[in-house]
């Protein structure tokens, strides 16, 4: 998982470089999501995001979901931390690729990381959707699939 600093920096960078990217099924752009919430880029701090884990999330999935909704906004969680959303999970893929590449660089060798993604088991296609997301070539600044070599 990304550190709180990595996550905040990633969101701030996306808000600066891709403000007009459509990020919601309703057609809202990233800028519009933040404007609707009354949040500007200067408010993007670790404390304001409030995504640091603490004891309250231990064995409480409801608290975990609330804690990992930046600014307590489900829209931001859906945009940045989900594999299935209006963007096909692109921001989450980019964030994971960034985290994994930094992890490998810091260790000086190829290393493994355990990614924990929710499969709710409500629909048969969930596993296939996740597999497609993992193997998709994302192009741009983050070419190739989420999985490293």
Image (cartoon, rainbow, N blue to C red):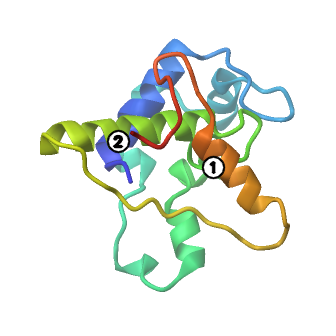
Please give the label number shown on residue 82: 1
Question: Along the line of sight, which residue is nearer the eye, 14 or 102?
Answer: 102
Q: Secondary structure at mark 1?
A: loop
Q: Quadrant of residue 56?
A: bottom left
Q: Position of residue 69 (x, y in %)?
A: 56, 55
Question: Along the line of sight, which residue is nearer the eye, 42 or 117?
Answer: 117
Q: In which quadrant will I find the N terminus?
A: bottom left
Q: On screen, 145 above or below 147?
A: above
In the shown orientation, is residue 102 left or right of residue 37? left
Q: Secondary structure at mark 2?
A: helix
Question: Along the line of sight, which residue is nearer the eye, 14 or 103?
Answer: 103
Q: On screen, 64 above or below 47?
A: below
Residue at x 68% of width, y 31% of height: 33
Question: Along the line of sight, which residue is nearer the eye, 97 or 135?
Answer: 135
Q: Quadrant of residue 76?
A: top right
One can see residue 138 in this view: yes
| Gap between marks 1 and 2 measured at Cα | 15 Å
Q: Earlier in the sequence, mark 1 or mark 2?
A: 1
For the residues labelled 1 and 2, say whether their Cβ atoms are less than 8 Å apart: no
In the shown orientation, is residue 105 left or right of residue 45? left
- The local crowd at label 2, few if under 14, some if 14 to 19, many if 20 or more residues have their Cα within 10 Å, is some
- The local crowd at label 1, few if under 14, some if 14 to 19, many if 20 or more residues have their Cα within 10 Å, is some
Q: Position of residue 100 (x, y in %)?
A: 34, 43
Q: How many marks?
A: 2
Residue at x 56% of width, y 34% of height: 91
Q: On screen, 90 above or below 118?
A: above
Q: Position of residue 16 (x, y in %)?
A: 48, 16
Residue at x 39% of width, y 62% of height: 114
Please give the label number shown on residue 149: none
Q: Position of residue 28 (x, y in %)?
A: 78, 27
Please give the label number shown on residue 99: 2
């Amino acid at each position: 998982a990304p550190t709180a600093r990595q996550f905040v920096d990633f969101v701030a960078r996306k808000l600066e470089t891709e403000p007009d990217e459509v990020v919601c099924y309703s057609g809202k752009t990233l800028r519009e999501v933040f404007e609707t919430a009354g949040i500007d880029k200067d408010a993007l701090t670790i404390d304001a995001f409030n995504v640091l884990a603490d004891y309250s999330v231990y064995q409480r999935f409801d608290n975990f979901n609330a804690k990992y909704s930046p600014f307590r906004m489900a829209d931001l969680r859906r945009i940045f931390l989900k594999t299935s959303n209006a963007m096909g999970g692109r921001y989450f893929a980019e964030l994971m690729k960034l985290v994994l590449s930094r992890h490998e660089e810091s260790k000086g060798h190829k290393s493994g990381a355990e990614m924990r993604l929710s499969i709710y088991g409500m629909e048969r296609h969930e596993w296939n959707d996740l597999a497609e997301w993992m193997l998709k070539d994302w192009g741009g600044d983050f070419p190739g699939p989420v999985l490293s070599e």
